[in-house]
Structure formats: C-alpha cells, structure tokens
C-alpha cells in the first residue's frame, strides 16, 4: 500500500493525465448524456444566486445541478490529491521559465503556486487586485462570452470535431501568449514586484 | 416560447445536458465521483499550477500541450466509437452532442479568457481544484470569475456576437 502511495504521489506524466482527462468526455456522455464543460457552473451559480431578471440567467438550472456536483467533486479531488498523494519534492519546472519568473520577482518555487502571489495577505493589495480580481473577472467574462472554456471548447468541442471550438481555442491561446509575453511583466511591476 | 427557445440555444453552447429523465439525490453521486477523479488528475499532473501555465505560454515545456493534445485525441476516438457502435447512455438514451454554432464571441471572449488564464494560471476547472488543494485565496478569484460571468449575462445583448 505504501509503495502504491509513493508511486501515485509522483507527478503524473502528460501521457497518463491527458488520456484520463479525455476519458471524462465519454464518461459523461454514457453516464448521463451530458457534454463536458466546466465554466457553465459559474453561470448556474449566477442563475441560482443573482438572476436579477436577466434573460441569460432565466433557465431551468435545476436540470443542471449535476454540473455543480461535478465541480464540487473537482474541489474534493484537489483536497484528496493534496492531502493523501502530495508530491514531497519541489515542483520541477523548465529552467528558462524559472529564470524568467525569477527576473520578474518570483522567489518561491516550492509548491504548485508561488506564495509570492497566492496568499490571503495579498488580498487587499495591488497583487490581489490584479491576480485575483482582474484575472478572475477576465476568466469568467471571457469564458461565458466564448461559450465555454478549455474543457467545453478545447476538449469537448474539438473532440466532437466542431470548428467553432477550434476557433475559440486558438483565441484562448492567443490571449494567453499575449498576456505572458507582453503584459505580465508590466502588470507584475504594477503589482509591486 | 421564444425565450425558452433562445435559452436552449444558449445553454447548448455551455455543457449541454441531453438527458431526458431527471436526476436527483443519489443519481447525482456519479458526477461527484467523476469530479473527484478529475480533480485528482488535475493536481497530480500539475495542471493547476500557475508555473505550468507560465511554462506553456512561454513555450518552455511540452507538458501542457501533451496533456491537452492527448486528452483531445482520446476524446475524438471515444466519440467516434460511441457514434459508430451506436453506444447508448446507461439510461438507454441515444447519445446526443449538440452542435456549437459559430459566434464572434468565440473570438472576442476566447481572447479575453486567454488573457485571464495567463494571469490566474487557471481555467475554471483548475480554479476549483486549487481551492481544494488548500490555496483558499483562489476563492476570491472564483468569486470574481462568477462576477465576470454575471456582467457578461447582464450586457450580453449589447456586445458584438
């Protein structure tokens, strides 16, 4: 058993993780005739909590409870993996990325997320405003405007050979490249790094 | 009727649910289990890591491309098998994958999401897994993402689409 836990606690390579994620597509289709997608859960939360008579949030969200149960599961999965199968070693990232991020002011490379950014102390600072509030807003606004995120478009959409999803995915990547290559440096300076 | 039709069309762009029979209580447990498995993979493959997303957008590592690429290949093969073998859902229904129609939002919205993805280091799925992994401050990011979704819903009719 201990051997199993040691083995499973190492970081999983892409060729194990990718197919497992891909299998979510047939699993949801066969279990409940459902298309894979995660960002819709954010819409259901709006529809349940603050519909405010907006037509976009007037629909039968009770039928979509499964989606919220699924994301609750993802959260629990995060807890389980971190609590029981946590990797004891530091995360290994590309030397070049590490050098670039060090130059930008990141000092902590010990975990999955840098504590230079992702801590409660930063919540009412420029770091919090940029990395949590602005970043989160762009993710929520953008995914809904695009009609899906990496799961709904890049994985489910392209898997079912739908070209609009390929277009969406190309623009996800374009936005990400532009932010990383051009804006993240100035934004981090603005955040006080 | 018109509103209902419009909503069905819009919901069809999200994570459409084609199941005819309703599901409640224990029937939902299977989605919880699937979600847990999915969350574990997210953490163990380090997809939830801000560093891995930076690596991807700096073209310094193949890892994320490998994960997304092999997930898509697995998805394509699975869907082809379901279609060709006419596999039914466990409740005996014919499996239906609604068509996604092209809208300009996939361009503008996709681009906006990409900008956010590189800042937060997370698309919506990993946001939930990050919170579960103990990075509880990401709750703030999640709340902001919900606010972003709401603002889109409020002004969607005024945006080019």
Image: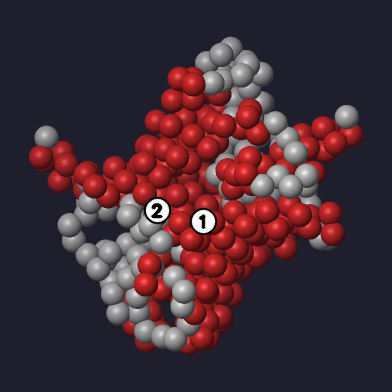
Give the Cα distance between marks 2 and 1.
Answer: 9 Å
Chain of the residue on which disc 1 is drawn? B
Q: Residue furthest left?
A: A2
The residue beneath circle 1 is B142
Q: Are marks 2 and 1 in contact (CB under 8 Å)?
A: yes
Dot placed on the residue nearer the N-terminal end, 2 or 1: 2
Helix, strand or loop at label 2? It is helix
Q: Which mark is residue B131?
A: 2
Provide residue A146's location: percent of width, then percent of height: 69, 54
Q: Residue furthest right?
A: B2
* Same-subunit check for callouts 2 and 1: yes
Q: How many marks?
A: 2
Helix, strand or loop at label 1? It is helix
Q: Which mark is residue A188?
A: none
* Residue B3, picture quadrant: top right
Q: Residue shown at 78%/47% (left/top)?
A: A54
Q: Residue shown at 46%/78% (left/top)?
A: A125
Establish if A98 lies above or below B111: below
Q: Image check: B157 left or right of A137?
A: right
Provide residue B82's location: percent of width, then percent of height: 57, 24
Provide residue A139's location: percent of width, then percent of height: 59, 60
């Amino acid at each position: 058993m201990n051997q199993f836990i040691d083995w499973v606690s190492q970081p999983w390579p892409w060729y194990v993780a990718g197919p497992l994620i891909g299998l979510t597509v047939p699993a949801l289709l066969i279990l409940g005739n459902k298309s894979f997608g995660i960002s819709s859960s954010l819409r259901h939360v709006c529809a349940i909590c603050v519909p405010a008579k907006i037509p976009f949030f007037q629909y039968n969200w009770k039928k979509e409870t499964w989606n919220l149960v699924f994301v609750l599961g993802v959260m629990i999965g995060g807890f389980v993996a971190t609590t029981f199968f946590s990797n004891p070693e530091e995360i290994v990232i590309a030397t070049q990325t590490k050098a670039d991020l060090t130059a930008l002011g990141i000092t902590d490379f010990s975990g999955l997320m840098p504590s230079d950014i992702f801590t409660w102390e930063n919540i009412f600072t420029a770091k919090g405003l940029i990395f949590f509030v602005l970043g989160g807003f762009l993710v929520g606004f953008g995914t809904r405007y695009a009609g899906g995120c990496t799961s709904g478009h890049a994985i489910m959409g392209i898997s079912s050979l739908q070209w609009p999803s390929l277009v969406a995915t190309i623009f996800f990547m374009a936005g990400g490249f532009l932010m990383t290559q051009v804006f993240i440096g100035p934004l981090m300076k603005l955040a006080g790094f | 009727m018109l509103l209902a039709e419009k909503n069905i069309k819009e919901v069809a762009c999200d994570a459409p649910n084609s199941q005819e029979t309703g599901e409640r209580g224990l029937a939902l447990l299977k989605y919880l289990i699937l979600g847990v498995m999915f969350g574990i993979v997210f953490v163990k493959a380090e997809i939830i890591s801000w560093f891995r997303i930076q690596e991807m957008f700096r073209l310094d590592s193949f890892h994320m491309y490998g994960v997304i690429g092999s997930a898509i290949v697995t998805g394509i093969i699975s869907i082809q098998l379901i279609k060709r073998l006419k596999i039914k859902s466990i409740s005996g229904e014919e499996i239906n994958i609604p068509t996604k129609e092209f809208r300009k939002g996939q361009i503008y919205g996709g681009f906006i999401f990409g900008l956010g993805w590189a800042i937060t280091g997370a698309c919506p799925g990993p946001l939930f897994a990050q919170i579960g992994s103990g990075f509880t401050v990401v709750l703030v990011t999640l709340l902001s993402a919900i606010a972003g979704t709401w603002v889109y819903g409020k002004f969607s009719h005024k945006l080019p689409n």
